[in-house]
Each structure stands twice: as structure tokens, then as C-alpha cells.
Amino acid sequence: MHGLRKDGPGNRGFRPGVLTGALLAGLLVALAACSQTSGGTAAGAVGLKITWFQLQSGIFAPVADPHAAVSVANRPWTVQARVADMAFLDDTLYCAVNGSGLASMGKDAAGAPVFSYHPDSLIFAHRTVTTLVPRQGALAIHLYYNALLNDASLQDLAISGISLVSYLPAQSDYAFLISPFQRKNPDWEAVGFAPESENSFDFEWKYTDASETRFAYTRYHADTRAEEAVDRETYLAALGVPSITGPDVPTTLAAFFASCRAGISLPSSDTALQFSLRSRESPVRRNYRSQKESDSAVAVPVFQEQGSLFALLPAGKVLSAVSGGSRTIALPRLPQGFRYTDLVKWGDALVLPWEETSFTDVGRAGILVFPLPR
């Protein structure tokens, strides 16, 4: 850790029950994409090859494929080393490495992926990263301590009372963003986070002891450091749109969601589809859910860039809509029990995190760099 400051310069998803919110977030990820698929032999962009990386001690180590990945002990998804989120800051892609910190991706002279690492074990160990938000030349990072799914007690943490930090690339350093509510209530955890813009963040706070569990909701303005209390309905509204069609959904997106839905078999009528849209044009994700309330949900990550759309579907396929046309791209087959969990378009390639999952636990994890077929 390099000279941490208390204050720096000036997703996700709908949860039907706040008591099970943290667990449901993990289940949404587990349902995001499936392991058994074929493909991966299509010709890709010139200078890029299909490349696999496994997270080993916080480093992206090249491997032949997930079959050849080094075995690791299963840990709860909340604390296991895995890619928890991705975000672009200018033209640099950052990966949030759970339990470690950030890793930024670049390319060498031959166009192969290279990584730079920005770890801080005092901040990130035994905490769950949920969201990266680009803002004013920095990255805001939401993280929290999950008492239910953890391998360390709260007393073992080197630092307590933090839920939001900022990474400052110019200084290669982290700074705390502590809201007034957390400053007054250091024992509360921000288990929910709904960014509305690069400066406006809605929080769901949770306090638990041997006798009770309480919740509170606030909206924090990172630019002015002001904060006001909000109600639960306001917080839930900030999580996204409870529809994938209609006046609150842009026509182009509604048509794309319909195409995605046509290729997805849901396990029951009580299962919702949740489209989580990341865009190069917007610093925050936008969520669209097919049902306002549901017992379970299948998460479908979507990436948008200059009008092009890419969605990670179950069964390990990507549906793309580019220049008015659409196609389905089959991803390389993963071993049984492995899943793709997210995607972004990175130049002429897709970057897709993958994980070995077993209910609430994760084993091996890493990313695939997959050149887009010509």
C-alpha cells in the first residue's frame, strides 16, 4: 500500500429480498453462462490468437486452456481470486481481481495481451469487489465484507469501515472515499451498490449483530461528498428497469433483448432474464429485467460499443448485432463445472472471464482473450 489517503479527489442487479442479496448476486453470476459448448476455431483478427489466462496468486498466468489450469482450493465466490468486474478508463481495460486489486490490460509489439498489476492486500483481502465505475480520470471501486461467505472474521481485517475506494492511475495509488453515513456508522457494510452516474451512488447498508439485522439506504455524491437518506423503493429503482420492452427500453435494445431471449431456455416461468448493459459511452451499467419480482434470474451480460451489441448467452455463445446484422459466435468448450461469466469487446477481441464453480464456491478462474471471427 502506498500512502493511502482518507478521501480522494473529486451491479448490480435486482434483488427480490435484501436478506439474501449478497448470496443472490453470486447465484446470478453462476447462472450467467454455461460451460459446455463447442467452437473456437474460427479465424480471428490479424495479430491476435485465442489466449487463455489463469489467475495464480493474483497474476494472469498463460495456460493452454482451462483443462490445463493449475488446481486451486475452492473458496467462497466472495473471497476467491476471480475477475469480479471490468471497466475501461480511457482506452485501458481494467479487471477487478477479487481479493487482490486491479490489473490493467495492454498489448505488446506483437499485439499479445500484457498486464500491469495494482494490488493492495490491506484493502482487498477477504472483501468482495462488485463494481468498477470510471470517474474523472479515476476508478471508483465498490467492495464489502461478506460475513456469511468468508474465510476470515471481521476482527482479522487490517482495515475496517470501508466500502468505496478510488484508484488514481496518475499516482498508481488508492484513496478511500468514505461517505458521511459510513463515517458515522463504521460497523455497517454497504452490501448493495447502484451507481446512477460517475458521481452519484446509491447504497444499501446492512448492520448485523447477535440480536438484530438492520438496513439503511443513502445516496452519496462523490464529487461534493454530500449524502442524503433515501428509501428502499428509491434504491430498488436505481438498480435498473423492471422490463425488457416498452417505453423505458430503447427500441434497439428491446429488439436485441428479444433476439437473445429467443435463444435462451429458462428453467421455469418464475425465472427472470436480467440484461446487464455495459457501454464504452457510459461509466455505469444499466440493468433491464424481464420480471419485476422473481425467485431466480439468469444474468446476461451485454456490451455496447458505437451501436454494436454483444451478449453472453447461456451455453457459452455470444450473440452480436453489428451494422444491422446479427450472428451467433460459439466460444471454446469449457470443462464440466466451468462457466463464462462476463464479456467486454477489447479492440478486435472479446475478453471473457471464466470460473470453475460449485454452488457458492469457486475454484480455478481466469480470462479468455477471443479474437472476433472475421
Image: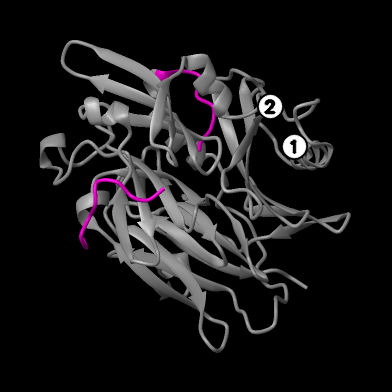
Q: Is residue 71 visible?
A: no
**Secondary structure of the magenta portion, mostly?**
loop
In the rendered image, which residue does mark 2 sit on?
Answer: 290
Which region is colored magenta? 1-18
As displayed, is residue 202 above or below residue 374?
above
Q: Secondary structure at mark 1?
A: helix
Left or right: residue 210 versus residue 56 is: left
Farthest residue, direction top: 211
Which colouring convention does the figure follow?
Answer: one colour
Quarter that holds the C terminus:
bottom right
Identify the residue position indicated by label 1 in the image.
261
Q: Are marks 2 and 1 in contact (CB under 8 Å)?
A: yes
- Closest to the observer: 116 or 55? 116
Quarter where residue 163 is shown: top left
| Labelled disc at residue 348 | none
Q: Residue at x 28, y 34 (%)?
A: 146
Mark 1: which amino acid? Arg
Q: Is residue 345 left or right of residue 193?
A: right
User: Which element is circle 2 on?
Assistant: loop
Residue 272 pos. (x, y %): 63, 27
Q: Is residue 280 among the parts visible in the rendering?
A: yes
